[in-house]
Amino acid sequence: MQNKKHLIIISVLILILSGLVYYGLLASNLFPTQAANQAIPIDWLFDLELKLIAFFFSVIMVPMVYSLVVFRKSDDDQSDGPHMEGNTTLEIVWTVIPLIIVIILGIIGADNLKQVLAVDPQANEIKVVGFQWGWRFEYPQGFVSNELYLPIDQQTVLKMESSDVIHSFWVPEFRIKKDVLPGQITEYRVTPNLLGSYVVSCAELCGSKHAYMLGNIHVVSENEYTTWVDDQVKLAKEIELASLGKPDSGRGKQLYETAGCKACHSNNGSKGTGPTWSGLFGQEVTLADGSVVVADEQYLFNSIKQPALQTVEGYPSNAMPDFSYLKDGQINDLIEYIKTLE
Amino acid sequence: MNKPKTSFKKAVVFYLAGQVIGLIFGVLIQVMVTNTFEPKYFWDLASWLLGVLLSLLGFFYGLVGYYGIVKGLIYQVIGTLFFASLTTAIRWMAGMEPFDMNTFIFTESAWVTGALGGSIAFLAGVGALSDWFKWAKGEKTEDHRHDLKGYIKYFGVSLDHKVIGIQYTVTSLLLLSTGGLFALIFRIELSAPGLQIMDTQIYNSLMGLHGIIMIVSILLGISGVINYLVPMLIGAQDMAFPRLNAFSFWVAVPAAVLLLSSLALGGFDTGWTGYPPLSTRAPLGMSMFFVGIWVAGWSSILGALNLIVTVLRLRAKNMTAFKLPIFVWAAISTSIITLTATQMIGLSFQLVVFERILGMPFFDPAKGGNPILFQHLFWFYSHPVVYVFILPGLGIISELLPVFVRKPLFGYKWVAMSSLGIALVGFLVWAHHMFASGMNEYLRVPFMYSTLLVAVPTGVKFFSWVATLYQGKIPREIPTPMLFVMGGIVVFLLGGLTGPPNATVSTDLHLTDTYFIVGHFHDTMFGGYIFPFFASLYYWFPKATGKKLNERLGKWHFWLMTPSFLILTLFMMRVGLLGMRRRIADYDPLLQFDFWQLSMTISAYLIATAVIIFIINVIITVRGPQNATGNVWRSRSPEWQVPSPMPAHNYDHQFQVVGEPYDYGLEGSKYVEFMVDDEVKNG
């Protein structure tokens, strides 16, 4: 029967096109390198979905294009086509089968999520703070770093919080992404499995410099990690002692950039969310309550530790995030830097 | 009413005058506000926008005189100033700061009340409220207004659903062009890494406006098609509530003005989704955006109400549920969503505005609020609305295919039910936009199931289209509307197939907030709306005007737009998978996206060229002869059984349904039969 012939050819073409599309997609290197255990089930599921996409793409495209070619009529044929109103069995089949596929995919997806969320009770814990517009990593050993070091083949749980608006923590090589919220801690569990350096980028629009809110991640061996942590602890103690003894404007400038001050306080006179630091030291400042004070060391120190106590007139009263984590020596460094700004 | 002396030439002169006067005033205001003068004010965006408003006002004035939209816009400006001043006076009397130089002289609360009051003033000025005021005073009004002759009727209140349909459609095309223009501008910025022509704040505003203007354009476009077609398809003279219909159109105009005004008032840097806490701290433009959408929501809700009542009450004799044209099923399903869900976006935006101007900390965790609450409220509407965007288009595909292939719509009842099915399931999936948000880990699973479930009724449509095509009579030279129908199917297929990776939670963690999503929704929007929208314009243009759009230009439009669009979205998905986040003005050169990004920019310009070809086609055809006054497509549908252009009251004689809508191939069958004895009663 003519109809059977059409259907057989269509079926064969569907199989061929599915194969071509699937292998074509595979050959296209669609995904970044896989660098975490959590990425393994995710990539497996992507692969399954690519197969489904290739198949269903063909199931629709092949009969459509086939019909457009094979059933082309001549210009003088003004007659109507066959009166095929429908076929209830077919309708039921192509409702129930997709329904079953969808349910199975759901079950697979749920199990896949479970694998990704697997908890290692002895995971390495690090606090992550996202802010406009950078990342800060607070290690439990008592130091703060702007670069994230992670030990390979060990689960690390990042406990993340934002100091201002919603951000999102994403490393394409790890696949997983998690929003970083103000007033709430969100968890991000990752077990890196490939040595190397990666970039974390903020994946939730967070204001003007969202595009540049990037951080560096280094996945290193267990030994390198412990060495690095010990070094950082020592370094932090040394710097603190040095700053308490003799504040350094160079370190202050570095903090100005990495701790996020420069997001709101310009160093060149231009207007921002907060008062400019240019020429600030020693200047007379009018506060919101009308009183006038001199911006000396004490004033600047308090403004950093407890900004809400004395707000400058004309500036929002509670826009400044919490910087109480800064050590006294670090604040001295910052003040030293401010002194250098004309 | 006397028709004032107007002309296109006058319109152009006034346009230019408005631009110059506006620029001068804009510069003066900037000088006043900043207390300095800088040459850059002459090319500053804020200065130019006042000029744009005045020049548009001037242009319309030159075309139609002090009537309709001109009166409306003038009333809106005066109304805004009046209500803003009223609020300022009340603030001053209450001992609060009356002015705020940081928010362009008026305080934000004054601007918000001004915006709302100005929108109502616009409606009064354009004449959308006059009949209701008369009724309130106990006066009678004419049931059938006679429209002004010529193009002027499109610039003011008309009660004719065909005029309103065209008003909606033209406004939608204007907004499409504006939103598209913004995309063309920022696509230049994105073609190479580094910031070349704009700073990140302007980028964020243009990108956010691109999104919301396109969304409003789609809502107006589908209202245009639905308003124009549904009364004709069911045999009615007009919609059930013609004045409400006019109101629903005109309320969208001040809303669009508010949206565009946000650019002049500091912009907004949150994208159209407006998440707090970022939106709580955004510039004044953010509130204009929120209020603009709140006002626009009335158009959707009231339009949906009107449609549902029309279909329930004004159908032709014997037009039972499963004898309705399939597009009417699509319109009903769309309207059910619009009627019930739109309130949620209004509410969520309203809450942020209250947080901004009244200090109510709904979403501020420091004061007991929760930012994730906003996302739930917002997406509860914003997910179902995407089905609003596509259901009419999918209905058009189902409506047109049988006509072109001379075969019944395969499984009509199942296709009809699938529209309702999509509408219903669409309400259950919203949190799939929030899989990375920090919501409860396992609560994401039921949303994954419900999201995957939408594939089932959608699949029913695809399989039905394929079965309709199979063994159909495919025309040797495929007419333009059918090209767009087929293009819509292919593009929507791509959009739909990229759904499951977004639906499964673990894979979505990689995909969410990347260009993969941007590619996915551009595919679904073009496939579900843009392509079928163009198909319907080419198809029903002869019905509205008695003239058929040029086939050659139509084919240029299609063949230029489609491959470019496929390249655009496939490349979007590629860079997204490889690490490109969305909503970024700049990207890391190390990612090596240069080739893909440049290609996307070129594709965007080719798409724009295709749309320009379409607009040229419309202009040429409108000026050409009336050569298509009969049943150009040999359709069984009732509107094609009467001559084109459609008579003023649609059908001089009522019809009754005597057969199935799509019984092509059934010898001697008819869908409708006109009842010569029954004259349509006027009134």
Image: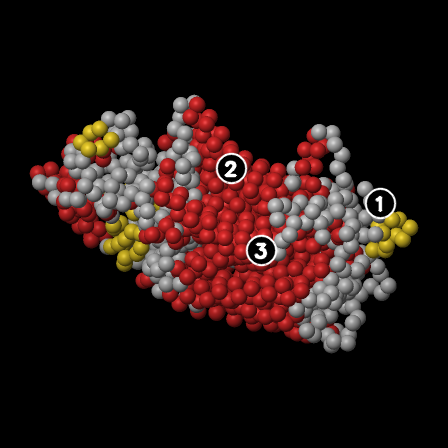
Chain for disc number 3:
B
Report the residue at 65% width, 49% height from top: B4
Seen in the picture, residue B534 relative to A129 is either above or below; the reply is: below
- Residue B93 picture quarter: top left
Nearer to us in this view, B394 or B242: B242
Report the residue at 69% width, 61% height from top: B541
**Can you give x and y, in whole percent of width and height, for residue A116 in the image?**
41, 49
Report the residue at 81% width, 48% height from top: B316
Seen in the picture, residue B666 relative to B299 is either above or below; the reply is: below
The kind of residue tagged 2 is Thr
**Can you give x and y, in whole percent of width and height, for residue B265 in the image?**
43, 43
Report the residue at 79% width, 60% height from top: B643
The kind of residue tagged 3 is Lys
Q: Residue furthest top?
A: B94
Q: Secondary structure at mark 1?
A: loop
Chain for disc number 2:
B
Q: Residue furthest left?
A: A245
Q: Give the CA separation, mark 2 to mark 3.
A: 28 Å
The kind of residue tagged 1 is Lys
Nearer to us in this view, B551 or B62: B62
Residue A114 visible in image? no
Chain for disc number 1:
B
Q: Secondary structure at mark 3?
A: helix
**Can you give x and y, in whole percent of width and height, for residue B139 in the image?**
74, 32
**Can you give x and y, in whole percent of width and height, for residue B437 in the image?**
43, 43
Q: In this rendering, which labeled residue sits more in front, label 1 or label 2?
A: 2
What residue is shown with label 2?
B80
- Left or right, A14 with respect to A194, comes to right
Q: In this rendering, which labeled residue sits more in front, label 1 or label 3?
A: 3
What residue is shown with label 1?
B681
State the count of labels: 3
* Residue B10: image tag: 3
